Amino acid sequence: MSDDFELLRSCFQLPYELETFEGRRIIRDTADLKDVYSAVRAHYARNGVSQMYRHCVEARFRDQTTVVATHETRLVSGNVITQAPFAVYSELRFTGEKWVIVSSSYAIGDRDDHNQALLGRDSAVS
């Protein structure tokens, strides 16, 4: 929400696998990640999203360098939730220096436009 792409970029390992109910996309490079970032930010802007709240539901170590976790996300405009809360299941890996996200599966059942933005298919972004 801070519009800091470089900060967001530092949280991901590329390639990064992203999945929704609408399909799957491999984010191979920084340009691909920037496309998804821009499409999702445009989706948030169109829907008046001013805050994002994430709550960790469960997390566990798969091994010493891998964590699998589920969090619930709520998108808010002022004090109104803009869409139904949704779950995201992610795999994080320790690189030796820091933890990074290597894959995520989004369970957004009620918003095709949000799924399309995540997959980089947002036609409203130029």
Image (cartoon, rainbow, N blue to C red):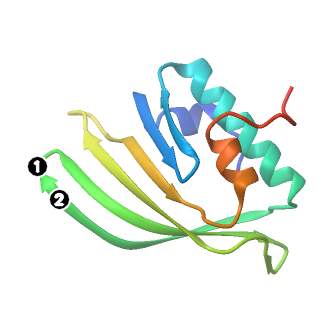
- CB atoms at circles 1 and 2 under 8 Å apart? yes
Residue type marked 1: Gln
Is residue 97 in view from this perspective?
A: yes
SS for tag 1? loop
Residue type marked 2: Phe
At 76% from the left and 44% from the top, the residue drawn is 41
Quick check: 30 above or below 10? above
Residue that label 2 marks: 61
Instruction: Tell me if mark 2 has few (under 14), some (14-19) or many (20+) residues whose alpha carbon lies within 10 angstroms of its own.
Output: few
Q: Position of residue 78 (x, y in %)?
A: 85, 74
Query: In whole angstroms, how far apart are the C-alphas of marks 1 and 2?
Result: 7 Å
Quick check: 4 above or below 46? above
Q: Position of residue 107 (x, y in %)?
A: 52, 62
**Marking on residue 64:** 1
SS for tag 2? strand
**Marking on residue 78:** none
**Which quadrant of the rendered structure holds the C terminus?**
top right
At 74% from the left and 38% from the top, the residue drawn is 39
Instruction: Tell me if mark 1 has few (under 14), some (14-19) or many (20+) residues whose alpha carbon lies within 10 angstroms of its own.
Output: few
Q: Position of residue 102 (x, y in %)?
A: 36, 39
- Tell which residue pokes out farthest to the front in this image: 22
Q: Quadrant of residue 47?
A: bottom right
In the image, 78: left or right of 107? right
Q: Position of residue 11 (x, y in %)?
A: 45, 39
Closer to us: 85 or 97: 85
